[in-house]
Image: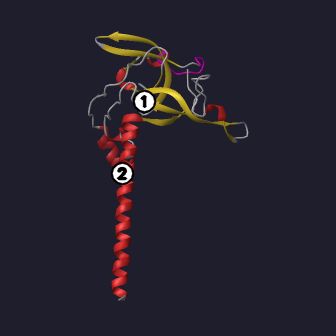
């Protein structure tokens, strides 16, 4: 009798564990799909885009507008890229190049758009700037990116125009914003919740 009860309890625990594992697996893959194909949040630590984007803003990067850029290697896949923090895997992954592929989008970047892109000087670094000029060379589009706060912005004036393959997505609103004052106290900027950028 006791053995039967133990078996029933064990089977219940195993069934619940299996359900939990399946739910976590579904959530994991949904998170990857959302971040690769739809968009993702991004923290802005610089004042180079003020007054449009403030230091401390969390912005939404819309990847659907220009078309989702497919990963170049494992390190570009959100959540799975955690494995590339292992030294041997990181070195092996650095040799991989799946090439540049982008899904069809609603439109191409236009002058005036605020865009997130990989820095041409360090492709692991994301930059947020505004498109000020577009140039076509040998059938490829190149974008002149500038920060609204030109005095402190490190932009196309330093690294030149960027190719379309470096563009991650369009930024058109903040999610929320946190201000840090002189005493290092954090304060929410309530007027920046889902604030539409211009």
Query: Who is closer to the viewer here, 97 or 7?
Result: 7
Image spot of residue 4 (x, y percent):
33, 84
Observer-nearest residue: 193 or 97? 193
Location of residue 54 with respect to 18 vertically, above or below: above
First in sequence: mark 2 vs mark 1: 2
Queried whether the magenta region covers residue 107, the answer comes back as: no
Residue drawn at the location 39% of the way across and 29% of the way down: 64
Q: Residue at x 28, y 28 (%)?
A: 101
Magenta stretch: give its range: 149-156
Residue 122 shows which numbered tag? 1
The residue that appears at 32% across and 41% down in the rendered structure is 74
Q: Is residue 50 visible?
A: yes
Q: Which residue is mark 2?
A: 26
- Label 1: few (<14), some or many (≥20) within 10 Å? few
Give neighbour class at mark 2: few <14, some 14-19, many 20+ (Cα, 10 Å). few
| Circle number at residue 16 | none
Residue occupying the point 71% across, 36% down: 181
């Amino acid at each position: 009798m006791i053995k039967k009860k133990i078996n029933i309890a064990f089977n219940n625990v195993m069934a619940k564990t299996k359900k939990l594992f399946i739910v976590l697996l579904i959530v994991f893959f949904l998170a990857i799909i959302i971040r690769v194909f739809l968009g993702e949040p991004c923290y802005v630590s610089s004042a180079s885009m003020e007054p449009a984007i403030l230091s401390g803003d969390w912005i939404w990067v819309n990847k659907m507008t220009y078309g989702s850029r497919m990963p170049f290697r494992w390190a570009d896949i959100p959540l799975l890229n955690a494995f590339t923090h292992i030294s041997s895997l990181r070195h092996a992954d650095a040799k991989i190049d799946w090439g540049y592929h982008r899904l069809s989008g609603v439109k191409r970047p236009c002058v005036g758009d605020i865009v997130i892109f990989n820095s041409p000087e360090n492709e692991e670094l994301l930059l947020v700037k505004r498109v000020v000029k577009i140039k076509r060379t040998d059938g490829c589009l190149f974008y002149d990116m500038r920060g609204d706060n030109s005095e402190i912005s490190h932009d196309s004036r330093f690294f030149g125009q960027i190719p379309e393959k470096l563009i991650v997505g369009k930024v058109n609103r903040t999610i929320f914003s946190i201000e840090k004052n002189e005493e290092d106290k954090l304060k929410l900027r309530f007027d920046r919740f889902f604030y539409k950028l211009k």
